[in-house]
Every structure is written in C-alpha cells, then in structure tokens.
Image: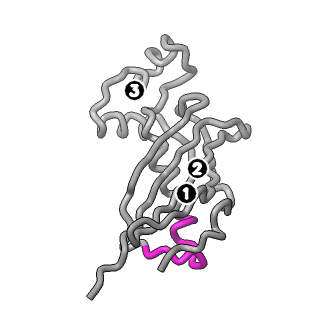
Amino acid sequence: MALDQSFVGRTYPPTAPYEVGREKIREFAEAIGDANPAYTDPEAAKQFGHSDVIAPPTFVFAITFKAAGQVVQDPQLGLDYSRVVHGDQKFAYTRPVRAGDRLTVTSTIEAIKSLAGNDILDIRGEVHDEAGEHVVTAWTKLVARAAEEG
C-alpha cells in the first residue's frame, strides 16, 4: 500500500537533547578506523581551530536516524518497517559537532515517492545546538520494499 502523500511537509517535534561526549566521539572514530587526532586529542583539535574534539562527519547519523524513528513509528503514516532498507544518507554542515554539544533533531518528511511498487521516503533532520544554532542537516532516504506476490 502506497504511503500517504499528504504527509509530505509534516514536521515532528524536536528530540530531547543529546549530549555529545568525548568518549562517544573517540569510540566512533575508532569504530570507523579514522585516526584524525582532532577526534581524540583536545590539544590537536585546538591546533585545528576547534574549542574541543570534533566528531567525524557521519557521527550525527546515530542521532538523526534515531530521530527519524518518530516518522517511522507514526502509525498514521503506515510504514511497514520490516520491509525498509536504508537507501541513502547525506549531510550539510554549518559547523562540526563538538564534544559538549547538546543537540536536538527536528525531522520533516521531504518526499514520498512510489517506484516499481516500492515506497521511497525522504526525511530531513535539522540538528541544532542548545543555543538554537544550526549545526548540520541530514537527509535520510528509506526504501520500503514492495510486498512479494504469491
């Protein structure tokens, strides 16, 4: 069943603040194999002009994807998550994420398309710090595969 086009433009409430910790950044950088010292060493980060360690660019996926859960779990949308695969991800930064940031995410459905029986859902996550300043926009594309016939 195709997703309801009237959901395009629907914005969900901001998430509770997520506090970015140095250890979380270090663990993430280690997990992706990125040894950039700006991710683990506060002094190195300061030499690059940052007030504290910064997070690798894809770090915010964890919080923006969790925030997109508000969309996915909306019973009125009718998305069958058991058929969903992650289609694409992209980011546009105003500034890097830093240790100590308290970030909120506001998710908006940007597009709903049907293609070959699959529903394609584009979700935009606007990430702001506790001062209300924009940090990054993340776009997530989810594909709900068509039900198999027979």
Choose the circle earlier in sequence order: 1 or 3.
3
Choose the circle earlier in sequence order: 1 or 2.
1
Look at the magenta stretch and give its main secondary structure.
loop
User: In this figure, which residue is indicated by the disc labeled 1?
Assistant: 67
Give the total of numbered labels: 3
Of all residues, the one furthest to the top in this rendering is 47
Mark 1 touches mark 3? (CB < 8 Å): no
x%, y% of residue 30?
A: 30, 35
Where's the C terminus, which quadrant? bottom left
Q: CA distance from mark 1 to mark 3?
A: 26 Å
Under mark 1, the amino acid is Ala
Of all residues, the one furthest to the front in this rendering is 116
Eyeballing the image, is 109 above or below 6? above
Q: CA distance from mark 1 to mark 2?
A: 8 Å
User: In this figure, which residue is indicated by the disc labeled 2?
Assistant: 125
Mark in front: 1 vs 3: 1
Q: Tag 2's secondary structure?
A: strand
Mark in front: 1 vs 2: 2
Magenta region includes residue 64: no
Under mark 2, the amino acid is Gly
Front in this rendered view, residue 11 or 103? 11
User: In this figure, which residue is indicated by the disc labeled 3?
Assistant: 40
x%, y% of residue 26?
A: 38, 34
